[in-house]
Image: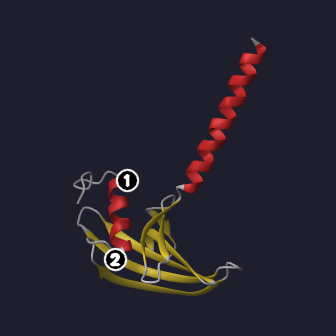
Amino acid sequence: MLVKRLCAVVSGVIVLSLSTVAQGAEQFLIVGTDSDGYPFKLDTQTMGEKERKFGNVLKIYQFKDDLTFEYMLNASCGDERLWIVGHRVYNKRTGKKISEEKENKEIPAYGDTPSSTAMKYYCQAIKARGWQQQQ
């Protein structure tokens, strides 16, 4: 009986550990690539969170050579509109911010761009009206 309980506890710990690893792997969802094949990755764990100076944003990252590019988007699912509100560039090795720019440029909310794909994923994830089905 004790051996069965011990096996059940160990199995539970292993399942929880694997679940945590799987969740970590899902934090970044590839939403497109550039012409050189570098992927754009949506941070699914921070979607819609408030970012100082930029509001509630979706963050898309791209890692190229020694740089990390962070693009911040504001999505209005109800209005079906999308804006790029800013971007930052970091040194990939040190993590030090090299530049930061605030923008407010409306961009297409539909199509197969990384930004529109990120918006579609976000709006479906929050179950926004009209986004439950494939658009």
Quadrant containing the C terminus in the rendered view: bottom left
Q: Which residue is mark 1?
A: 125
Q: Is residue 46 above or below residue 11?
A: below
Q: Which residue is pictured at 26% across the width and 56% down the height?
A: 131
Asked whether, in this view, residue 67 is left or right of residue 119, the answer is right
Furthest residue toward top: 1
Q: Position of residue 85 (x, y in %)?
A: 41, 79
Mark 1 residue element:
helix
Closer to the observer: label 1 or label 2? 1
Q: Is residue 15 above or below residue 97?
A: above
Q: Which residue is pictured at 30% across the width and 79% down the height?
A: 107
Asked whether, in this view, residue 2 is left or right of residue 66, the answer is right
Q: Amino acid at mark 2?
A: Trp
Mark 2 residue element:
strand
Which numbered disc covers residue 83?
2
User: Which mark sits nearer the N-terminus, 1 or 2?
Assistant: 2
Circle 2 packing at 10 Å, graded few (<14), some (14-19), many (20+), is: some
Quadrant containing the N terminus in the rendered view: top right
Q: Amino acid at mark 1?
A: Ala
Q: CA distance from mark 1 to mark 2?
A: 19 Å
Q: Position of residue 32 (x, y in %)?
A: 41, 71
Q: Which residue is pictured at 35% across the width and 66% down the height?
A: 119
Q: Position of residue 22 (x, y in %)?
A: 57, 49
Q: Nearer the viewer, residue 110 or 104?
A: 110
Furthest residue toward right: 2
